[in-house]
Amino acid sequence: MKSDTGKETTPQSTGLFSRLLYLAASLLIGVLLWQAATMVFGLPAFILPGPGQVWRRFIQSLAEGQLQQHTLTTLFEVLAGLLIGGLAATSLGYLLAKSAPLEKLLSPYLVASQSLPVVAIAPLLVIWFGPGIFSKILICSLTVFFPILINTVVGLREVPNDLRDLMRTLKASSTQTLWKLEVPAALPIYMGGLRVGATLSVIGAVVGELVGSDRGLGFLINIGRGQYDTALVFVAIFTLVFLAVTLYGLVLLIERQFLSWQSWRQDVR
Amino acid sequence: MNSCPEAALSVHNLDVIFRDASGVVHALHDLTFSLPPNGFLSLIGPSGCGKSTLLRVLAGLVPPTAGEVCYNTDQPKIGMVFQKANLMPWRRVLENISLPLELKGLPKKTILDRVHEVIRQVGLEGFERAYPRDLSGGMAQRVAIGRSLIQDPDILLLDEPFGALDALTRERMGDELQHIWHAHKKTVVLVTHSIPEAVYLSDQVLALSSRPGSIVLDMPVDLPRPRTSEIRYSDSFSKLTHKLRDTLQEDNTMIT
Ligand SMILES: Nc1ncnc2c1ncn2[C@@H]1O[C@H](COP(=O)(O)OP(=O)(O)OP(=O)(O)O)[C@@H](O)[C@H]1O
Ligand SMILES: [Mg+2]
């Protein structure tokens, strides 16, 4: 990534084009193999529907408006969880990075909460907070919390001491040090946490919905399963994958936007 | 930082001892010296003898273990150039240099005018929009020098600022520094490994012993000013460089 001279845009855009070409080819191969498998094994549609059936189910649930509605629900849970969990993790991470005693005090709980799979407490949260959206948002918040917290702490730790000294000789206030030094210096690592968090948030939402809910893509999967409408299950799964990949790509895009100077990590001067 | 009337900067019986998990390092021992306003002092001594530590004490970054440092004003404006260029990799050359003024909250226009002036002084025209990763070591070092000059400091602390430069650029930057010092009335403390550079630029040279660094020679340099390259070939110049070299060699150290 050598950035913004006119010469380099051409190879970069052909690179993008060929990447898209490869993506299309690999998707096509996947669909063909899938089609072949359904034909060779001759499985009934409620076990393994073919690509054509799934596609028709997709169009149908779009037409009914059912897919959009559940997708929006899940998306809302995912984003709200990311926002709430992210905000909480970022602020706590900042405090932890600033105060060693606080970190020592809290780290047993943090490590414990890290080793506890959210899947295990999702039923509890649904029992306590009901099958509505709220319990899902809570689950999402909890899933994204840890990676973002850790990356906040690590990112802030990585701020070079020499630059901190520079800010001190320039008599920078602590707010100035935060915005002009700590935030930009910690951003590359922080964004990595956000990227992981975005995918985890999708997982959190679905787990919550599978455990107990009345809407969302996880709920749709449950419905499909209950009615032997396996094509619908596939539609929901593909939509979920699409959601997760899009979110991941979105964070990556933001990252590229803010961190165009990024190759500095390799040779810090 | 207490204030002391006559000298711009004075140091009394300074000792610095670092204690950490890996042990105790006695970095500086019993330094006493002073520097008049607008004086130019060079520090020279073997690697690891505590030169950078002394500059950090002068900048208020490291507290003295014993002794004291004082300035003739309460809040001296200090410009520091670190041994590594120490630039912010996410800021372009322009923005790295403007940082000190940004922190003061000056209007954008004022800052920009001043930045361009400084960029001319350190010879970085055409690189305003480059990121640090695209600069050579010497250019990065010049950005750091520009950043220290922009706030027009009373006291300029320079830690081997010319270390990464080729010989000729080094002399040119030395002359530029001499010019800035002369035109803008600053007190300068320069760490260098070059004996001729120390003599050429300074009013006063301190030679430090190996660790714990203590003063083995406090040598005034009374060559006429302004100095130009010819002076390097004069007898008085070589007398001073010889004296400095002999002192440093006596201390049984290596100077490159
Ligand atoms: N914060 C610190 N904690 C512990 N030891 C330190 C610290 N800073 C410096 N030292 C030690 O103090 C001694 C002097 O270091 P300093 O960087 O001042 O040397 P120097 O004269 O600048 O060397 P060089 O010419 O190689 O730059 C070294 O042994 C170094 O390891
Ligand atoms: Mg040093």
Image (cartoon, coloured by chain):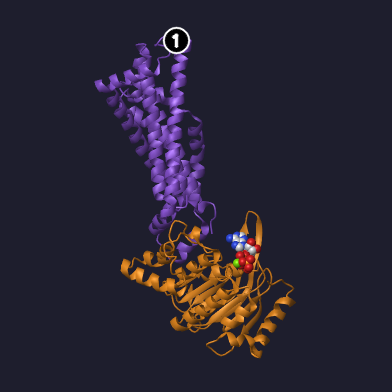
Report the label total. 1
Q: Residue at x 56, y 76 (%)?
A: B11
Q: Nearer the viewer, residue B254 or B18?
A: B254
Q: Position of residue A2 (x, y in %)?
A: 47, 52
* Type of the residue with mark 1: Leu
The kind of secondary structure element at disc 1 is loop
Task: Using a 10 Å C-alpha cutoff, classify the residue at mark 1 as few (fewer than 14 neighbours), some (14 to 19) or many (20 or more).
Answer: few
Ligand 2: image quarter? bottom right
Q: Where is residue B249 in the image (x, y as percent from the top left)?
A: 73, 76
Q: Which of A48 and B197 is in front in this view?
A: A48
The residue at which mark 1 appears reads as A43
> Do we see residue A63 in this rendering?
yes
Give the left or right position of residue B107, taking residue A199 as reference. left
Q: Position of residue B71 (x, y in %)?
A: 49, 77
Res A237 quadrant in image: top left
- Chain of the residue that carries numbered disc 1 in the rendered image: A
Q: Position of residue B243 (x, y in %)?
A: 69, 83
Colour seen for chain B: orange
Q: Which residue is drawn at 38% across and 57% down?
A: A175
Q: Does the residue labelled 1 lie within 8 Å of ligand 1?
A: no
Whether residue A129 is situated above or below residue A45 in the rendered picture: below
Residue sitting farthest toward the left: A64
Give the left or right position of residue A253, taking residue B194 as reference. left
The chain letter of the purple chain reads A
Q: Quadrant of the C terminus of chain A?
A: bottom right
Q: Nearer the viewer, residue A172 or A204?
A: A204
Q: Residue at x 55, y 64 (%)?
A: B137
